[in-house]
Image: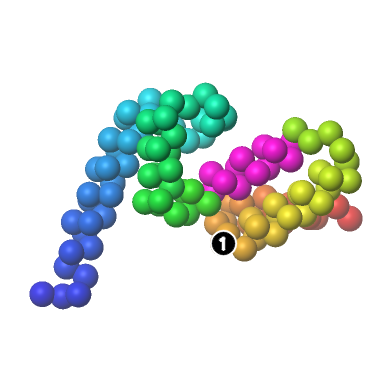
Amino acid sequence: MSKHSGYPLRARCNRALAGVVFATLGKDLSTITSIANLTTIQYIQRELLMDLYPRLGEGYRLKTLFKEYLEMEEPEQAKAFLAYGCDLATDSKIQPFMDAAKSRKAHWS
């Protein structure tokens, strides 16, 4: 028995669990805009998905971070917040976020 023999089963279980969570959430993560709109069960399920899929969770956190930036009214605060968000996106190693951060940084000059 190889050391990875249990991995496919674990991966299938995680995918099945994620499918159940998505089905009961009734939404995909891209449409969840406010924690205040979630029921307690939906909030717990969202957190569970982010724990099961860390890159998904990191992407979701970056998405909400950039959404907060768009809602800021103070230009200096927004600029500092955007720089911080771009650094986090670059460190995340998630290619679409890295590309977005690179594009935003290119427009600062």
In magenta segment, residue 65: yes
Q: Is residue 35 at all visible to an observer of this figure?
A: yes
Q: Reply above or below: 48 against 33.
A: below
Q: Give the side of residue 29 with respect to residue 15, left or right.
A: right
Q: Reply above or below: 19 against 1.
A: above
Q: Residue at x 24, y 43 (%)?
A: 16
**Residue 85's x, y, as percent?**
70, 52
In magenta segment, residue 16: no
**Residue 100's x, y, as percent?**
67, 50
Q: Reply above or below: 50 against 8.
A: above
Q: Residue at x 30, y 38 (%)?
A: 19
| Crowd around label 1: few <14 · some 14–19 · many ≥20 (10 Å) | few
User: Extreme front residue here?
Assistant: 40
Q: Give the side of residue 22 with respect to residue 38, left or right.
A: left
Looking at the rendered structure, the kind of residue marked 1 is Lys
Q: Which residue is drawn at 10% across and 75% down?
A: 1
Q: In which quarter of the image is the C terminus?
A: bottom right
Residue under numbered circle 1: 93
Q: Is residue 107 at all visible to an observer of this figure?
A: no
User: Extreme left residue here?
Assistant: 1
**What secondary structure predominates along the stretch shown in magenta?**
helix
State which region is magenta.
59-70
Rendering quarter of residue 34: top right
**Residue 94's x, y, as percent?**
55, 57
Q: Residue at x 51, y 34 (%)?
A: 30
Secondary element under disc 1, as helix, strand or loop, is loop
